[in-house]
Image (tube, rainbow, N blue to C red):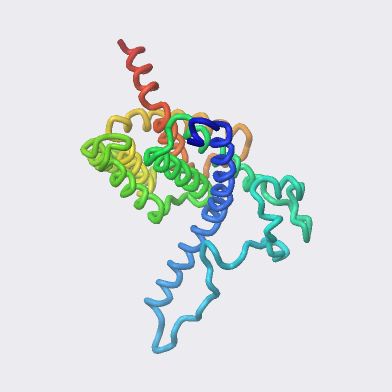
Amino acid sequence: MLYSQYAWLYFFLLGLFSLLVGSFLNVLIHRLPIMLERSWRQEYQDYFAEGDNPPAQTEPYNLFLPRSACPHCGHQITALENIPLLSWLFLKGRCSSCQHPISARYPLVELLCALASVTVAFYYPPGWALAGALLLTWILLALTFIDFDKLLLPDQLTLPLLWVGLLLNLSHQFVPLADAVIGAIAGYMVLWSIYWAFKLLTGKEGMGYGDFKLLAALGAWLGWQSLPLILILSSCVGAILGITLVVMRRHQQSKPMPFGPYLAIAGWIALLWGEQLTNWYLGLLS
C-alpha cells in the first residue's frame, strides 16, 4: 500500500533506514578485521601456551562492545554524535572533545549505502527479491572498503553471501537454482585457474582466495551467465580506478591493488543492469 500510493514516502523511509545500515557498516568495516586479527592471535596463543598457564584474558571486542570512541582522545561517542550523516556535518568533521578531524569516509559510506539502496528499490518491488538485493548491496559495500583497507575479503562475509544466494534462488528469486549452482562453481574455478596459471608462470600470487569466494558468491546470486560480464566490468572498473588513484598519488605503484572492490562494484552493476548491458554488447557484435 505504501509503495503504490506514497512512493516518495516509501523511498524516503528506505533511505533513512539505509543511512542507519550504513552507520552499522562503518562499524563492521572497522571492527571485523580487528576482531579477526585478535581471534587469530588468541588461537595462536592458545595453541602454543606453555604449561598450565592460561593465556591472558582481554576485554570484549565485537561489533557492539566497547562503545564507539574517538581513537585519539578516547571520548565516547554520544547518541547525538552518532546520527548518520547529520552528526558529522553538525560537528564539522571534528571530534567534539579534542577537535581532531573525523574521516569523511564515515558519512561517505552512509551516503553511498542510502543512494545504492534507493537505486535498488527502483528496480525491485517490495518482496524477497528486494530484500535479497539490498542485503547483497550492503555486504558488497562492506567488502569493498574492507578489501581497500586490509587486502582482505573475510570468509565471515563471503561464504554466508554464497549460501544466501543459493537459498534465495531455490525459489528463482534471481535465476534458476541450476544456474546459481553452476555460477557458484564456475565463479570459484575461473579465478582459481587464473591464480594458479599466473603463479606457475611468474612465481607470484596475483590475487587472494577471497576473490575466488566473492566471484563464487556473485555466481550463486546472479547465475553463471553473469560471470563474463562481471569479469569484464571488474577489469574496466579496476583500470579506471587504478589509474585515477595513481594520478591522484593516493596509491603507490609498488603497493598491491585489491581486486575484490572491483568485483563487488561489477557485481552490483550486473545485479541492476546486467541483462541490458549483455544485450547491448551482443548487439555490437552482431
137 left or right, relative to 279: right
Above or below, 35 relative to 26: below
Q: Residue at x 50, y 50 (%)?
A: 146
Q: Quadrant of residue 99?
A: bottom right
Which quarter of the rendered picture does the C terminus lie within? top left
Image-based side of 116 in relation to 44, left or right: right
Residue 194: give x, y in percent of width and height: 31, 39
Residue that sits furthest to the top in the current view: 286
Pick whichever, 102 or 191, lies toward us: 102
Residue drawn at x 51%, y 32% is 119
> Residue 221, relative to residue 159: is it above or below?
above
Residue drawn at (40%, 33%) of the image: 271
Image label count: 0
Q: x%, y% of residue 37?
A: 47, 63
Front residue of 254/16: it is: 16
Say which of 66 and 49 sits in front.
Answer: 66
Q: Quadrant of residue 44?
A: bottom left
Q: Can residue 51 be seen at all in this image of the molecule?
A: yes
In the rendered structure, the answer to whether residue 168 lies left or right of residue 259 reads left
Quarter-wise, where is residue 45 in the image?
A: bottom left
In this view, the residue in front, 68 or 53, is 68
Residue 78 coordinates in the image, percent (x, y): 69, 61
Quick check: can you spot residue 200? no
Q: Residue furthest bottom?
A: 52
Q: In the figure, 197 relative to 97: above or below?
A: above
Give how far across and how far down residue 63 sits, in percent: 52, 61
